Image (tube, rainbow, N blue to C red):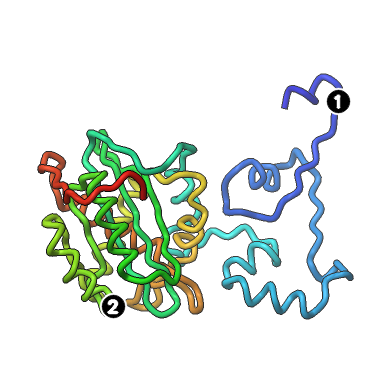
């Protein structure tokens, strides 16, 4: 902080906690700064109705962090915040051609979830998220058309899709047009293997996600293991996580020199 050092300036840092890393956490745990903590119960303008609404919109971890002001180490989280942050970089994403191998993961929406498509690019033995696309309450024909166009442009080595429940008829339709399609039925053992693959990639810094992928980052933070089951907390979503897990799972299984296959369906725009 050289701009204030020469003038005996004062620096005020105001924030809620966000994991056990970063400048704010280091400042809070050091002896350099004086600390002042204001609990939400000390704010007279916040009504009980406001609190009920905020509690309903947060999972327990979010409530403890944002409202109880706790620096969470997330020991029970599958993807601790510190693990995620080390793999986050600021870069542009979007639909573009690349000479590197590309892999797609598609988690089809069911009930309250969205359909999420994640594209990965493999370079220097590292996977990078280059595209995330979400469909909310969109008919299957529109989703299928988009997937075919995207596959034609990116020429993915492999496309792993959720072949469970509502994903079965979509898989049957797409498999006639996309030879590189791989249907994954979400059994408990398969899901565990997929999540383990994803955890290993984060642990070894072999995956990169963009800073603006806020939905993905939030879902990764919330993702948990309860007993033998991996899932989002009740009333939360894991479609972004599972789409990424599908893409990573097939990327690890496939070799980077396989031939890219095009569908011949591409139009000018998506």
Which class describes the residues within 10 Å of circle 1: few (<14), some (14-19), or many (20+)? few
Q: Secondary structure at mark 1?
A: loop
75 with respect to 47 (left or right): left
The picture quadrant where one finds residue 92 is top left
Tell me the residue that label 2 is attached to.
166
Which class describes the residues within 10 Å of circle 2: few (<14), some (14-19), or many (20+)? some
72 with respect to 44 (left or right): left
270 is higher (above) or lower (below) than 97: below
**Mark 2 or 1, nearer chain start:** 1
The picture quadrant where one finds residue 240 is bottom left
Q: Residue at x 71, y 79 (%)?
A: 52
Alpha-carbon span between mark 2 and mark 1: 64 Å
Camera-side mark, 2 or 1: 2
Q: Residue at x 26, y 62 (%)?
A: 194
The picture quadrant where one finds residue 237 is bottom left
- Visible residue check, residue 196: no
């Amino acid at each position: 902080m050289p701009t204030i050092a020469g003038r005996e300036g004062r620096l005020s840092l105001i924030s809620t906690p966000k994991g056990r890393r970063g400048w704010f956490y280091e400042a809070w745990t050091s002896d350099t700064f004086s600390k002042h903590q204001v609990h939400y119960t000390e704010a007279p303008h916040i009504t009980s109705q406001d609190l009920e609404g905020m509690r309903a919109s947060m999972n327990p971890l979010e409530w403890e962090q944002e409202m109880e002001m706790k620096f969470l180490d997330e020991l029970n989280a599958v993807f601790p915040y510190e693990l995620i942050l080390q793999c986050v970089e600021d870069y542009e994403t979007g639909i573009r051609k690349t000479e590197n191998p590309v892999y797609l993961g598609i988690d089809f929406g069911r009930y309250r979830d969205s359909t999420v498509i994640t594209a990965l690019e493999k370079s220097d033995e590292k996977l990078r998220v280059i595209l995330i696309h979400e469909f909310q309450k969109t008919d299957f024909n529109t989703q299928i058309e988009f997937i075919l166009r995207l596959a034609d442009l990116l020429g993915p080595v492999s496309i792993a899709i959720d072949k469970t429940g509502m994903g079965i008829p979509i898989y049957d339709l797409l498999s006639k047009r996309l030879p590189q399609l791989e249907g994954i039925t979400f059994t408990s053992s398969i899901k565990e293997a997929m999540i383990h693959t994803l955890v290993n990639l984060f642990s070894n810094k072999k995956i990169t996600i963009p800073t603006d992928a806020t939905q993905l980052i939030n879902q990764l933070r919330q993702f948990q293991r309860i007993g033998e089951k991996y899932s989002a907390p009740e009333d939360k979503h894991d479609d972004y996580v599972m789409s990424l897990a599908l893409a990573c799972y097939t990327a690890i299984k496939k070799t980077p020199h396989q031939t890219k296959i095009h569908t011949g369906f591409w139009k000018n725009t998506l």
